[in-house]
Image (cartoon, grey):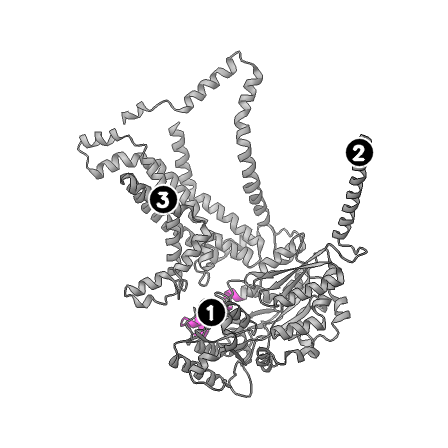
């Protein structure tokens, strides 16, 4: 009796260990018979950049195809570079992560991003050339373009109607007059524009035809003392004066979408999806939110905009390279790329998918300005400038607090140049 | 001062007696050896924890300070030694010295306020009746027990520009210019908020410590002083103060260390801003090292910070050590 029991225990033990071996194989990253079952892919996406439903459906499609699971982890833009650098240096980095287009060249240079040449060959033949530019460094494909977006004016229709404004403004002056009218006729704050919405400021600089940096010899230096930059800052200052928002905070502290949600602000300048933040905080506001293109100096040309965008990259240190590429093939497929464009109103990575933007009011408002949009310089040196305390933000606050643009440019020049020249 | 003779025999005398019996006594050797080892065994956990949690990071930091370690090197795990370059760059930069001076002034102002106010509250505790003393004590302990980040967040709310209680109260009291005042917009107003926060957080420690110290003063001394015709101030300076002196030294010493490395409060209130004007040394090390991703440079500044702190406290350290010798 006893011997039998021991034998049974022995057999059971062997079975468990065999099962354990099977489990190990699955976890080890190799492709077992039943796909990648048991593995989990970690994906970092930025706050608000993809809707929950989109994430859920991508995860379902991914699991159906590969048997592996995907875990989305939401990150904040503020402080993301420090977090990403540390994560990439670790044993288990996020396998796939969203990375801002202006930050991509710097990370490509560090060697933290995997080469995606084969992915580009298999699914990226018709990625829009201009959108793919930031993902290529020294001729190599280090990321895949995901989506692009530019800012629009989000306005509260109820407040505008209360002020008796019927048409959306077509020029900068009309826009200013409309906001002024709201200030006079209603008790709402005409526009919530914090002093450090620097992406909007970059857009204004692009609209003036200015540049933030210039090349001197073989290195980049501050170009904030350019009169075109000063003109952009004067425009910003004029509109900021209509807002009670703090001059030394950016649009994320507090989230301007949440301020807008209270229904006491006439307009904000933001991404189309920020309406989602507002609606989440105050569902009653949904029917009152409208969008229009940021008006430029003349009616025939919209304001310059910063073409923000994100790429998806694979960590060079990830042990699930193949699985990560499988994920990208699904997330960037025409189906899901199209749905992202539709649901978030962002510009998709292929021109053929732009039809998905039809009927999305935010996207329709954004589209006219995109052609005249631009980015910050796509150089590896740029990423350091965006680290807090960002000298461009300091420049803006200095001007808003009464310094002349020339004085403010001089004040931050040292810090700006130091960052552009810093060791990599 | 003859009273001191009456002090009860201290614990050291007993220990000495035990030690004396050890080597000469006929007791079993093994037992005495175990007895001799016991203190070391008891010290071991604390030593291991200190070495692991403090010594090891300190050594790492020291090694990093001689490296060129940026994003690339960190991600690719390469070690690039660059000798004393980081130190050279830090010590020759004007910023470093400006921040150092600012840190020293910041520490001086805070510690002076903490010690004066803390001592006054401590003396108040000694004079209060039972019920009021317990009430005040509870308030102090609650302030002391509040986690630093929680307290800092509350202060951020209190001093918020548009919805803060402080601006609202000032406005209600008739100072309407303060209705939308941005406390974080200038160097001095930011420092004001930080100093109020740090002083508020530190007073309980000093107050309770000094109150405890006053309870050790024998009441006969005050009677004797009164008989000799000493007034309140005279008996304070000749009786209370001499007793409190060692406690004052020790708490000042600790407060200097705490204030000097008050990273959390300064960083959380305004990130060292506006325009990097409220950065003290630890914040400067963080912004240069982690914020700008020059980890080697940050490590070098951290090492220099420790050296400066040692320099500042050397004097106090000597006094405190000397006093302990005197006590024995």
Count all numbered tags in the image, as a single digit: 3
Name the residue rendered at 55%, 51% in the picture.
B299
* Residue of label 3: B138
User: Same chain for the residues at labels 3 and 1, yes or no?
Assistant: no
Of A7 and B310, which appears nearest the observer?
Answer: A7
Q: Are marks 1 and 2 in contact (CB under 8 Å)?
A: no
Q: Which residues are magenta?
A: A392-416
Taking the image as drawn, is residue A399 in sight? yes
Q: Is residue A371 left or right of residue B274?
A: right
Disc sitting over residue A6 in the figure: 2
Alpha carbon distance from label 3 to label 2? 64 Å
Of B200 and B186, which appears nearest the observer?
Answer: B200
Q: Is residue B131 left or right of residue B252?
A: left
Q: Magenta stretch: residue A407 in it?
A: yes
Secondary-structure class at tag 1: helix
Query: Which chain does the residue under circle 3 lie in?
Result: B
Residue A283 at x, y percent in the picture: 51, 70
* Residue of label 1: A259
Residue B10's place in the image compared with B183, above or below, is above
């Amino acid at each position: 009796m006893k011997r039998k029991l021991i034998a049974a225990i022995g057999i059971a033990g062997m079975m468990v260990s065999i099962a354990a071996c099977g489990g190990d194989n699955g976890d080890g990253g190799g492709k077992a018979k039943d796909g990648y079952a048991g593995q989990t892919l970690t994906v970092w996406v930025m706050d608000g950049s993809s809707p929950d439903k989109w994430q859920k459906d991508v995860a379902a499609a991914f699991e159906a195809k590969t048997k592996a699971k995907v875990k989305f982890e939401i990150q904040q833009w503020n402080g993301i570079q420090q977090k990403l650098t540390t994560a990439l240096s670790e044993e288990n980095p996020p396998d796939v992560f969203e990375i801002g287009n202006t930050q991509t060249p710097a990370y490509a240079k560090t060697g933290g991003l995997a080469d995606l040449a084969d992915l580009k060959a298999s699914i990226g033949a018709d990625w829009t050339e201009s959108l793919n530019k930031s993902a290529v460094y020294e001729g190599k494909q280090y990321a895949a373009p995901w989506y692009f977006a530019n800012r629009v004016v989000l306005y509260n229709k109820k407040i505008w109607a209360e002020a008796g404004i019927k048409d959306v403004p077509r020029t900068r002056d009309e826009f200013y007059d409309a906001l002024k009218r709201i200030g006079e006729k209603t008790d709402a704050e005409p526009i919530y524009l914090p002093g450090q919405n620097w992406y909007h400021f970059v857009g204004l600089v692009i609209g003036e035809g200015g540049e933030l940096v210039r090349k001197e010899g073989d290195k980049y230096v501050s170009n904030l003392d350019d009169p075109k930059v000063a003109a952009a800052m004067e425009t910003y200052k004029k509109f900021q004066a209509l807002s009670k928002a703090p001059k030394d905070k950016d649009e994320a502290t507090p989230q301007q979408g949440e301020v807008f949600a209270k229904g006491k602000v006439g307009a904000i300048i933001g991404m189309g999806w920020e309406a989602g933040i507002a609606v989440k905080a105050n569902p009653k506001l949904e029917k009152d939110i409208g969008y229009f293109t940021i008006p430029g100096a003349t009616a025939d040309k919209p304001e310059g905009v910063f073409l923000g965008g994100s790429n998806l990259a694979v960590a060079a240190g990830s042990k699930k390279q193949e699985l990560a590429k499988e994920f990208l093939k699904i997330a960037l497929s025409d189906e899901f790329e199209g749905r992202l464009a539709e649901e978030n109103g962002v510009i998709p990575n292929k021109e053929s998918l732009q039809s998905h933007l039809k009927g999305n009011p935010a996207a329709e408002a954004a589209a006219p300005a995109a052609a005249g949009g631009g980015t910050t310089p796509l150089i590896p040196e740029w990423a350091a400038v965006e680290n807090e305390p960002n000298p461009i933000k300091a420049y803006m606050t200095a001007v808003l607090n009464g310094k002349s643009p020339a004085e403010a440019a001089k004040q931050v020049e040292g810090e700006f140049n130091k960052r552009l020249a810093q060791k990599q | 001062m003859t009273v001191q003779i009456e002090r009860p025999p201290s614990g050291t005398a007993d220990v000495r007696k035990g030690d004396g019996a050890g080597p000469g006594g006929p007791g079993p050797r093994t037992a005495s050896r175990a007895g001799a080892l016991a203190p070391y065994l008891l010290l071991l956990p604390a030593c291991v924890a200190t070495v692991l949690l403090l010594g090891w990071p300190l050594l790492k930091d020291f090694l990093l300070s001689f490296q060129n370690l940026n994003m690339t090197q960190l991600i690719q795990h390469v070690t690039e030694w660059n000798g004393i370059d980081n130190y050279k760059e830090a010590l020759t930069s004007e910023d470093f010295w400006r921040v150092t001076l600012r840190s020293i002034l910041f520490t001086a102002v805070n510690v002076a306020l903490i010690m004066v106010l803390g001592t006054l509250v401590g003396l108040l505790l000694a004079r209060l009746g039972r019920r009021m003393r317990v009430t005040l004590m509870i308030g102090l302990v609650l302030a002391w027990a509040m986690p630093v980040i929680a307290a800092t967040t509350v202060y951020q709310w209190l001093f918020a520009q548009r919805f803060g209680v402080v601006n609202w109260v000032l406005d209600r009291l008739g100072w309407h210019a303060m209705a939308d005042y941005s406390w974080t917009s200038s160097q001095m107003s930011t420092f004001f908020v930080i100093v109020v926060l740090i002083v508020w957080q530190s007073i309980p420690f000093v107050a309770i410590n000094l109150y405890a110290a006053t309870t050790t003063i024998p009441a006969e001394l005050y009677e004797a002083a009164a008989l000799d015709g000493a007034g309140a101030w005279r008996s304070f300076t000749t009786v209370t103060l001499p007793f409190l002196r060692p406690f004052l030294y020790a708490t000042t010493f600790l407060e200097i260390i705490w204030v000097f490395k008050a990273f959390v409060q300064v960083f959380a209130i305004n990130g060292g801003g506006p325009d990097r004007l409220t950065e003290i040394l630890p914040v400067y090390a963080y912004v240069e090292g982690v914020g700008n991703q020059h980890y080697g440079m940050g490590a070098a500044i951290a090492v220099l910070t420790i050296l400066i702190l040692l320099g500042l406290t050397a004097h106090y350290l000597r006094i405190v050590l000397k006093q302990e010798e005197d006590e024995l």
